[in-house]
């Protein structure tokens, strides 16, 4: 158990530093574009990797959120620590933008608290990884829409395709997968912080 906590802490610390370095590199490469442009590229990298890691951590493909209310596997904890590191980085990074968003800061704090609770309890890995998958699956298309606008593809067929992909994936994931996951999580014997985080 101590080894798992050490691994999670290492992934989180190294992750925060790595996300910061990735942002600095991207900011220098795309210096002519906005601060938001660079953060969206980093966010797209996170979302794509998080979805891949969440998919790889599924233990039972016949029931992706199973086993319910069980001890988290090491792979699930690593996936959660990976995203925790991104959330910490993004919370810090958002304070360097010209416009500080209170609702964005609150969102990040709630997510960080949820990740920490899941990692501390070492429980509900299946539910939390499923929540991560549902929330991040549409993010690359969300960011692609804005990236395309900034590089001059506003009101084009490519931008429309990104809009349609985002709307379709977001609606299916959040309207179908979301309510099912909330029901499963709330009805199971999960810690209250986990129930609040997923709801």
Image (cartoon, rainbow, N blue to C red):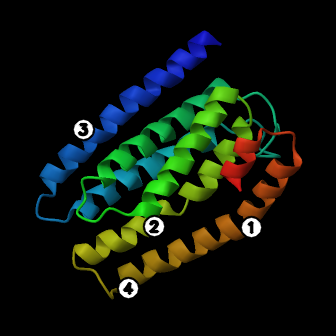
Specify whether residue 51 is in view. Answer: no
Q: How many angstroms separate mark 3 from mark 2 (CA)?
A: 24 Å
Q: Based on the displayed image, in which of its 4 quarters is residue 2 positioned?
A: top right
Q: Based on the displayed image, in which of its 4 quarters is residue 80 positioned?
A: top right
Q: Which residue is mark 4?
A: 157
Foreground: disc 4 or disc 3: 3
Contact flag, marks 1 and 3 (Cβ < 8 Å): no
| Residue 144 in picture, x, y percent from top left | 38, 68
Contact flag, marks 4 and 3 (Cβ < 8 Å): no
Q: Residue at x 70, y 28 (%)?
A: 121
Q: Residue at x 60, y 49 (%)?
A: 132
Q: Which residue is mark 3?
A: 21
Q: How many angstroms separate mark 4 from mark 3 (CA)?
A: 34 Å
Contact flag, marks 1 and 2 (Cβ < 8 Å): no
Foreground: disc 2 or disc 4: 2
Mark 1 or 2 closer to N-term? 2
Foreground: disc 3 or disc 2: 3
Q: Which residue is mark 2?
A: 141
């Amino acid at each position: 158990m101590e080894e798992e906590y050490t691994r999670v802490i290492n992934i989180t610390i190294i992750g925060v530093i790595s996300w910061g370095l990735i942002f600095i590199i991207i900011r220098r490469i795309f210096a002519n574009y906005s601060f938001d442009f660079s953060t969206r590229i980093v966010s797209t990298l996170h979302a794509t990797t998080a979805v891949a890691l969440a998919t790889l951590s599924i233990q039972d493909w016949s029931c992706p959120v199973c086993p319910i209310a069980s001890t988290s596997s090491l792979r699930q904890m690593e996936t959660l620590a990976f995203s925790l590191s991104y959330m910490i980085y993004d919370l810090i990074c958002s304070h360097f933008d010209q416009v500080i968003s209170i609702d964005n800061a609150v969102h990040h704090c709630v997510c960080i608290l949820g990740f920490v609770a899941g990692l501390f309890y070492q429980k509900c890995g299946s539910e939390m990884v499923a929540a991560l998958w549902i929330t991040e699956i549409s993010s690359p298309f969300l960011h692609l829409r804005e990236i395309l606008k900034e590089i001059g593809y506003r009101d084009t067929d490519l931008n429309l395709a990104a809009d349609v992909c985002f709307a379709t994936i977001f609606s299916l994931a959040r309207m179908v997968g979301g309510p099912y996951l909330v029901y499963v999580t709330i009805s199971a014997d999960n810690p209250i912080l986990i129930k609040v985080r997923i709801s």
